[in-house]
Amino acid sequence: MGSSELSLPEIARVLGEKEHRLIYLCEKGVVVPDIQDARGRGTSRLFSKRNVLEFAVALRLRESMLPATVAAAVVDILRALERKLRREIAGFSLPESLRGPKAPDLRVVLKAGRRLYFSLGAKGTKPRAFGGIDIKKLRTSKTVMLEEADDPDSIETGSEARFELSVTDVARNLPDV
């Protein structure tokens, strides 16, 4: 990805989406511009490359009929996970760290429509599980604390309904901007 700041029309063109869908995600607080938010009439939002990934992930979640509140929770946790991984892995940043051939596999897992997990691992290894967070409680909290799941195997087991999205695949499929 090239440019470090992007406008909403540029992102809409890159993602092949209508601008009003992206505006909706901003107005619902799903994606918050990293560089500049609109401040009244005549000002523009400016976004980072990470914001492009956040839009792409949120759009995939919405296509799967998940509400904007769930998409917002996923984006909040994705940001918290990036902060945590930056402390553990030198130079880790989204989306760049998910685009290379040796990139880890990062997945969002939503169980029973209410518990949110992320799994992260290299191919062929058992992934680390983070989260187990109740989505309803997350959106009312000001601070997101993301820790490894108490029971990492619970992400893989159980009979509850499950939704899974590979953030790594989304990042790899982003066009260069």
Image (cartoon, rainbow, N blue to C red):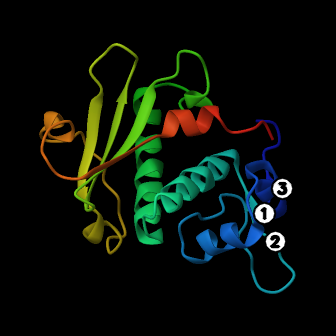
Where residue 97 appears, x then y in whole percent?
A: 57, 29
**Which mark identifies residue 10?**
3
Q: Which residue is drawn at 60% across and 69% down?
A: 25
Q: Can residue 43 be seen in this view?
A: yes
Which of pointers 2 and 3 indicates the residue nearer the eye? 3
Q: Residue at x 70, y 51 (%)?
A: 48
- Residue denoted by label 1: 8
Q: For residue 2, which quarter of the picture?
A: top right
Q: Residue at x 83, y 42 (%)?
A: 3
Q: In which quarter of the image is the N terminus?
A: top right
Indicate which disc, 2 or 1, sits on the residue closer to the N terminus. Answer: 1
Where residue 84 appears, x then y in whole percent?
A: 39, 40
Q: For residue 124, which quarter of the picture?
A: top left
Q: Say which amino acid is labelled 2.
A: Ser
Give the side of residue 42 with respect to residue 136, left or right: right
Q: Say which amino acid is labelled 3.
A: Glu
Report the Cα–Cα distance between label 2 and label 1: 8 Å
Element type where label 1 sits in the image: helix
Q: Is residue 95 visible?
A: no
Give the side of residue 146 with respect to residue 132, left or right: right
- Label 1 crowd (10 A; few <14 / some 14-19 / many >=20): some
- Residue denoted by label 2: 44
Indicate which disc, 2 or 3, sits on the residue closer to the N terminus. Answer: 3
